[in-house]
Image (cartoon, rainbow, N blue to C red):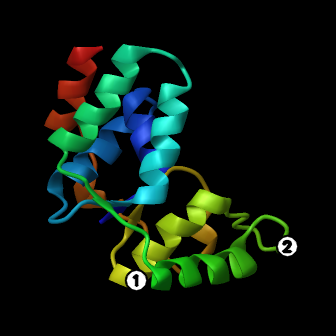
Amino acid sequence: MIVDTSALLAILRDEPEAAAFASAIEVAEQRRISAANFLEAAVVIDGSRDPVASRRFDELVSVARIAVVPVTERQARIARAAYRDFGKGSGHPARLNFCDCFAYALAQETHEPLLFKGSDFVHTDIPSALTPRRRGRARLHAFFMNMA
């Protein structure tokens, strides 16, 4: 599965979808995040100037064994096409932002579903990583909530 910034932030902020996202990550055979999305999530978390939150972000990526995938030229080209077709200003209802396009590109290149929060990606051709069997409270989610 490919993990979008929005899913990591939802887990770290214990948003209503956090348990479902953590459960999906826990049962996935592979977990990957684009380097662009990793940086985006880190910038958001580090922007709080809370060293505990920053450590929790790093621990989540490590404990969940989410591989940070470098952006390739092919992914950059897919991301460019995604912005053209689905980006803000394109008139398309997905309204993907810059970093959304990198999550899209990695999911498209690997043919893996995308774990995301919100309604942007539902308007694209990328399948969601959330399925009924991935619902429920996860050990990973409980682990991070006990650290808070």
Residue 34 percent coordinates (x, y): 41, 62
Q: Determine which of the numbered discs, if any, sits on residue 109 in the image.
A: 1
Mark 2 burial class by Cα count in 10 Å: few <14, some 14-19, many 20+: few
- Residue sitting at 51 percent across and 50 percent down? 117
Residue under pointer 2: 91
Disc 2 is placed on an element classified as loop
Placement of 56 over or under 92, stated as above or below: above
Count of marks placed on residues: 2
| Residue at x 39% of width, y 21% of height | 53
> Can residue 141 be seen by looking at this rendering?
yes
Q: Is 79 left, or right, of 108 in this rendering?
A: right
Front position in the image: 89 or 35: 35
Quadrant in which residue 101 is drawn: bottom right
- Could you tell which of marks 1 and 2 lies nearer the N-terminus? 2
25 vs 51, left or right, is: left
- Disc sitting over residue 2 in the figure: none
Name the image quarter holding the C terminus: top left
Mark 1 or 2: the one toward you: 1
Residue 69 falls left or right of residue 13:
left
State which quadrant residue 51 falls in: top left
**Kind of residue at badge 1:** Glu
